[in-house]
Image (cartoon, grey):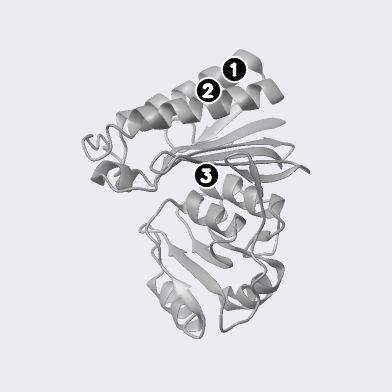
Amino acid sequence: MEKLYNEIINYLIRSGTRIIKKSGNIEDIGVTKKNLTEEDLRIERGLKEIIKKYKPDHELFAEEEHDSFPDTENVWVADPISGTSLFINGEPHYALVISHMKNNIVQFAAVYDPSVGELFTAYKGRGAFLNGKPIKVSKRYDVNKIKVIFASSSGWKDEGKIKEIAEALIKYSAHKIRCSFALRYCYIACGRYDGIIALTKDIFPEVAGGFIIREAGGIFKNDEGEDILKYNDRIFVGGNEEVYKILKPLIN
């Protein structure tokens, strides 16, 4: 699998280098949904081509053309461009995202931010990395000093839930940052922030981002407290161990 993982990584970097030149100068071609570009489709199709070349029995679960979860042992979960609206608007910190699951257990994940050339990777049992160097979640536990991200998707319809969580986070240093959901999770993994509560529209960035957090020594679970995420999960909590314990009750 190592050769396939490396080719996937190289493809993400090549694709990211190409699309950064189009950021802010590309059309939204979405008909049934907003924020879809020709590059979303091109990257997703390219990922499938690479996977099938090495492993014909592996299947792709991705946001655009492969959004039905396949019933098979090996599934690749991809968001070709996480944060497409940022890409369309010419803003930084969108990302190319993919992970490999075997029997629902994540084995590998990669998240690439072309805006700043940051590549986050993780391998089961081997840890998480930023541009090849090991990363760890923060060790900040003091409630007066922790930095928490609150991320709610524009597609999230329950305004009451958003307000409820936002009010519960007032006592902490809560941040709403403008970047891909996948990168928000990676910022937890490398210690830039200490924890996150996320209300999402899908699961594609979470499989990769959550795995990177866990391999960096942190915790990432759905609202039922499960590590193994289901394709219809939409509420997530992550962070270092102590911050997770603080945040988990806030979503109940």
- Residue nearest the viewer, comparing 167 with 120: 120
* Image: 225 above or below 13: below
Q: Position of residue 186 (x, y in %)?
A: 55, 52
Q: Is residue 70 visible?
A: no
Tag 2, which secondary structure?
Answer: helix
Tag 3, which secondary structure?
Answer: helix
Q: Position of residue 247 (x, y in %)?
A: 60, 74
Rate crowding at label 2 as few (under 14), some (14 to 19) or many (20 or more) other CA atoms within 10 Å: some
The residue type indicated by label 2 comes to Lys
Residue bearing mark 3: 204
* Image: 113 above or below 227: above
Q: CA distance from mark 2 to mark 3?
A: 15 Å
Q: Is residue 36 visible?
A: yes
The residue type indicated by label 1 comes to Lys
Q: Position of residue 145 (x, y in %)?
A: 56, 79
Q: Do the residues under discs 1 and 2 have CB atoms within 8 angstroms?
A: yes
Which quadrant would residue 37 be assigned to in this image?
top left
Image quadrant containing the C terminus:
bottom right
**What residue is at 27 percent from the left and 32 percent from the top?**
22
